[in-house]
Amino acid sequence: MKILFLGSSHFSKVVLQTMLENKLQVAAVVTAPDKEVGRGHKMQANEVKTFALANNIRVFCSSSVKKDFEKIKEMDFDLSVVASFGQILPQEFLDYKLCLNVHPSALPKYRGASPIQNAILNGEKQTAVTIMKVGLKVDSGDIALQQNVEILQDEMYSALEEKLARKGGEMIAQAISLLKQNKLKFTSQNEQEATYVTKFAKEDGLMDFSKPREKIFNQVRALSENLGTYFFLKGQKIKVFAVKTADEKFEINQIANDKNHFLIGCKDGSIEILSCLSPSGKKLNGKDFLNGFKPQGEFVNEFCRS
């Protein structure tokens, strides 16, 4: 079966790659147009386009499937597969041929733009990959396949995203095999159990040390790699890459008088900063940051203190 693939993110690229590894026939790819990047405003293609062209797959860039529908109809395909495309597809496209979606959550839980981050933020022990028929309402379509995926205790967003995307590509291969045999069945979602998640803003990366340590740990796991997590010290923004929880207790927002461990007090213990960005722009481990800036005993996020 000839597949039209729609996707525009790293997640999409890994799904597409896995589909090819499973010998699926991808006839063409629809993805977002190139974007300006950097100070020089140089146009750059996304990962999906770059990967597709490297594998001799036809690429069509579109900012609106609705506007480009007649051109897309001219492509030779039997069904479409969507993975993190970033557009609401029009009804005329959905009515044209079967359209399957790869969604990284246990639908109807975590419908929307940030299911992976929210699963980590909420301390979930497992999530899932769902293959469903695309509907007009976001992530509301009938479910064909769903498989649970374990979330490891210290797993970061990028590692979980990769794992879920690979699972998604494998499940699409399974779904198409069932479709060929006339055995692919769909089950409607329970709307009463639906939850929705939206995109994060940069402000969501601010580390609030008045929260429990596990919440802060999960925040860094979920957001540090894609959005950025940070706190303020002496009015300067300190970007954080990795942390772990610690048992030592002292005042919320206070940096411990410990030359070997960069500890900051939180609601129920402390957080150790393992890796962060210095104000000069250099990535440092926690101990080197302490030795260079000597902030022991001081407070972070001074604006949060009463």
Image: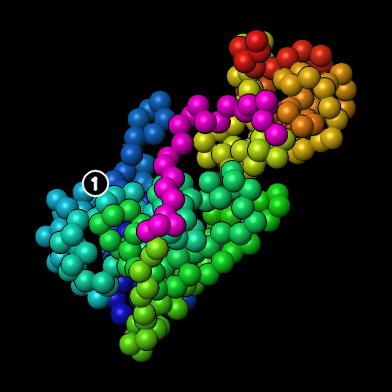
How far across and down, in percent of the image, does residue 58 sit?
A: 28, 63
Q: Nearer the viewer, residue 229 or 252?
A: 252
Residue holding disc 1: 63
Residue lying at 45% horizontally and 65% vertically, measured from the top left: 130
The quarter of the rendered structure image containing the C terminus is top right
Question: Foreground residue, 70 or 180?
Answer: 180
Is 193 colored magenta in this rendering?
yes
User: Could you say where residue 297 lies in the image, as x and y percent from the top left?
Assistant: 81, 14
Using the image, determine if residue 109 lies above or below residue 171: above
Q: Examine the rendering and report whether any part of residue 48 can be seen.
A: no
Q: Which of the two residues, 62 or 105, is positioned nearer the viewer here?
A: 105
**What stretch of residues is rendered in magenta?**
191-212
Crowd rating for badge 1 (residues with CA inside 10 Å; few <14, some 14–19, many 20+): some
Which three-letter amino acid code belongs to the residue tagged 1? Ser
Residue 44 position, x and y percent, is: 37, 42
Farthest residue, direction left: 70
Question: Is disc 1 placed on a helix, strand or loop?
Answer: loop
At horizontal 87% and vertical 18% (from top left) the residue drawn is 257
Q: Is residue 197 left or right of residue 87?
A: right
Picture quadrant of residue 234: top right
